[in-house]
Image (tube, grey):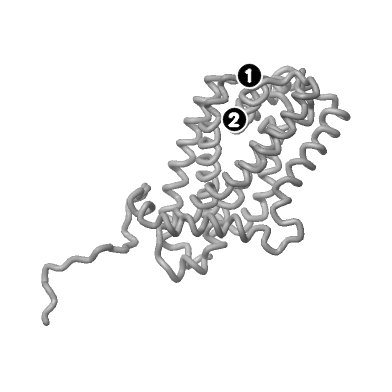
């Protein structure tokens, strides 16, 4: 029985790819693997810990309490009519989603080297699974925020939800894409420059302090006008300030700031895809 000469391969795997190649069809074809990666990310993180998923609750609560004591009680940073703890909890919950996406995706090539060297699948599925799995953690922390919001509301605190809350999912998408883009850039560079792995945690901490997580954006403009540009050129500062405006009706929501954030996110994502696609062809030789 002879093989037909005009038979064709179903799939062709080749290193010759476009510099920008966001192949939605191929990612959709591997959607079951994406779901498995999401489950793995959620289950394995706290699988061998004593408290397990309770860390999702403990971390934002202790961080918000610490910020309240240091920045509001000691440094006397005012939060208007919003209780300081609730103000900080809102900023931390939003910041944690971006931080978790950035830190996890920045380790994509190193942590998945064993899988990448043995099996083919769209490499972009790995960082995408991180962004999606962190949505579950973010949802849990939002439930914590809602619980304390209701508590303070019943106690008579002057808090209210803004009508712009309908755009909150858009902010979440922006954070996820920005974390994905930055993470892909860093993960690609870590394959050659290992020092970046050690500098990442330090850099994330510095970024948090310039992202208006624990203070109103207007405070920097009033108290430190010479250094306000450090915050105003940080896309995450506008995301966090806008999120607090939506959730607590405090602060401001700048249309220009959101447009700047969108443009910065698209640019970072574009650069991240370029570098990621280029690195995945040869990273196994340097990892």
Q: How packed is label 1: few (under 14 Cα within 10 Å), some, or many (20 or more)?
A: some
| The N terminus - image quarter | bottom left
Residue visible at 57% across and 31% down? Answer: 235
Q: Is residue 135 visible?
A: yes
Q: Is residue 225 visible?
A: no
Q: Could you say which is closer to the camera, residue 177 or residue 227?
A: 177
Q: Give the camera-side residue of 107 and 193.
A: 107
Image x and y of residue 52, in percent? 71, 56
* Label 1: which secondary element: loop
Q: CA distance from mark 1 to mark 2?
A: 11 Å
Residue tagged by mark 1? Answer: 252
- Compared to 126, does 216 lie above or below? above
Q: Residue furthest front?
A: 154
Give the class, few, some or many, for how many residues have Cα within 10 Å of label 2's Cα (few <14, many ≥20). Answer: many
The residue at the point 60 percent across, 55 percent down is: 42
Q: Secondary structure at mark 2?
A: helix
Report the residue marked by disc 2.
Answer: 239
- Most extreme residue toward the right is 74
264 or 141, which lies in front? Answer: 141
Please state the horizontal and vertical placement of residue 197, each as a whole percent of the image.
63, 55
The answer to which of 78 and 54 lies nearer the viewer is 54
Q: Is residue 270 positioned above or below 83 on the image?
A: below
Q: Residue furthest bottom?
A: 1
Residue 121 point in image, percent of width and height:
40, 61
Mark 1 vs mark 2: which is more N-terminal?
2
Left or right of 62, for residue 128: left
Give residue 158's position: percent from left, percent from top: 75, 18
Q: Is residue 28 left or right of residue 240?
A: left
The residue sitting at 87% across, 28% down in the picture is 73
């Amino acid at each position: 029985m002879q093989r037909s000469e005009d038979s064709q391969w179903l799939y062709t795997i080749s290193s010759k790819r476009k510099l920008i190649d966001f192949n939605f069809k191929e990612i959709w074809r591997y959607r079951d693997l994406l779901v498995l990666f999401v489950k793995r990310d959620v289950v394995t993180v706290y699988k061998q810990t004593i408290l397990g998923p309770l860390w999702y609750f403990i971390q934002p609560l202790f961080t918000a309490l610490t910020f309240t004591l240091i920045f509001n009680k000691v440094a006397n940073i005012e939060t208007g009519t919003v209780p300081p703890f609730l103000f900080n909890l809102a900023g931390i919950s939003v910041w944690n989603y971006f931080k978790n996406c950035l830190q996890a995706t920045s380790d994509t090539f190193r942590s998945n080297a064993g899988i990448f060297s043995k099996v083919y699948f769209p490499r972009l599925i790995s960082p995408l699974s991180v962004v999606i799995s962190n949505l579950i953690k973010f949802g849990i922390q939002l439930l914590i925020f809602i619980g304390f919001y209701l508590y303070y509301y019943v106690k008579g605190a002057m808090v209210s939800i803004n009508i712009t809350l309908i755009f909150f999912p858009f902010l979440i998408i922006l954070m996820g894409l920005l974390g994905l883009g930055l993470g892909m850039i860093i993960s690609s560079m870590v394959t050659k420059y290992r020092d970046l792995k050690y500098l990442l945690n330090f850099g994330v901490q510095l970024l948090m302090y310039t992202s208006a997580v624990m203070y109103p954006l207007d405070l920097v403009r009033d108290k430190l006008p010479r250094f306000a540009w450090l915050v105003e050129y940080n896309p995450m500062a506008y995301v966090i300030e806008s999120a607090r405006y939506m959730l607590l009706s405090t602060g401001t929501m700048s249309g220009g700031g959101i447009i700047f954030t969108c443009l910065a996110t698209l640019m970072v994502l574009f650069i991240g895809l370029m570098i990621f696609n280029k690195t995945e062809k040869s990273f196994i030789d340097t990892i």
